[in-house]
Image: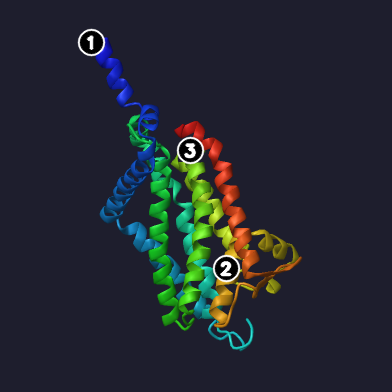
Amino acid sequence: MSQSIVKTDTIFSPDANLEAEPSGNFANFVQETTALTKRLVIQLQRRPSTLIAGIVQPFMWLVLFGALFYKAPQGLFGNDINYAQFLAPGIIVFTAFSGALNAGLPVMFDREFGFLNRLLVAPLSTRYSIVAASTVYIMGLTLIQTAVIVGASALLGAGLPSLAGLGAIALVVFLIVLSVTALSLGLAFALPGHIELIAVIFVTNLPLLFASTALAPLDFMANWLQIVASLNPLTYAIEPIRYLYMNADWSLNSVVFSSPWADLNFTAVLGLLTVFSAIALTLIQPLLKRRLG
């Protein structure tokens, strides 16, 4: 009887699975991530208000701010540029940022309701599939929201970038969502409950929006706010997208953002966003190992 129990425990041990089938680890990881992502999608289907609110809110921003600056002097934001073109990139990035910032909430609720503990004792090939599923889910949700906002912006007069430009926008959104999602998931494991996580989201969301170039150019701001906006990662996501909206002819060497200390081309901005994502992923690694390891 004791030998049977030992054998059963070994089979259902996550570490034993890793040792027994090293060649199948990746396939198991994909299968587990897919199943956990499907669970989140089912939750969204049952409560679609999250997706609806994530689309309605930025659409309202587009309409209201567009109407607010409807009679702005011609050329206020640059030659032959209307405010819809100027605003659309900021709303795209803000929508993606807000969705990514909320990525930790499902994990936090799983913690509080005890479902996460069940996952942690399940025979998973790797527990990182738990956070991978949340990341994939947020990426898909953000892609849908971004597509809707791009379409709505086009109808409101912002125009539509080229196919290559849309691909570049997707890349920029991917990088900012990856980094913010990582930080949000880290907070979901670090903070004691969802009240604290919601408080962080509430305190972080709008200040980062207003301390960026989403709603106004850098030279419209006070000197101290220009410095803050130039250090804000959202600015480095907004400015290349704005350049794509305003310039059909662009390249990786095109200067897309003039910060107080340097002119940055498309390649440099993508590099900074990649570094920011790498820093965010590195920061949460010790926490994930402690919680999931």
The colour scheme used here is rainbow
The reply to whether residue 145 is in sight is yes
Measured from the top left, where is residue 129 in percent x and y? 39, 42
Q: Amino acid at mark 3?
A: Phe
Mark nearer the viewer, 3 or 1: 1
Helix, strand, or loop for circle 2?
helix
Q: CA distance from mark 2 to mark 1?
A: 64 Å
Of 60 and 45, which appears nearest the observer? 45
Q: Residues within 10 Å of mark 3 (few under 14, many from 20)?
A: many
Residue under numbered circle 1: 1
> Is residue 230 found left or right of 84 in the rendered image?
right
Q: Position of residue 40 (x, y in %)?
A: 32, 49
Q: How many circles with numbers are drawn on the protein?
A: 3
Q: Is residue 81 left or right of residue 30?
A: right
Secondary structure under badge 3? helix
Residue at the spot of label 3: 189
Instruction: Tell me the distance, in whole angstroms, between the alpha carbons under discs 3 and 1.
Output: 39 Å
What is the secondary structure assignment of the residue under circle 1?
loop
Looking at the picture, does residue 105 appear above or below residue 22? below
**Residue 116 position (above or below residue 12):** below
> What residue sits 42% from the left and 61% below the top?
142
Q: Which label is found at residue 238?
A: 2
Q: Amino acid at mark 1?
A: Met
Q: Is residue 114 above or below residue 73?
A: above
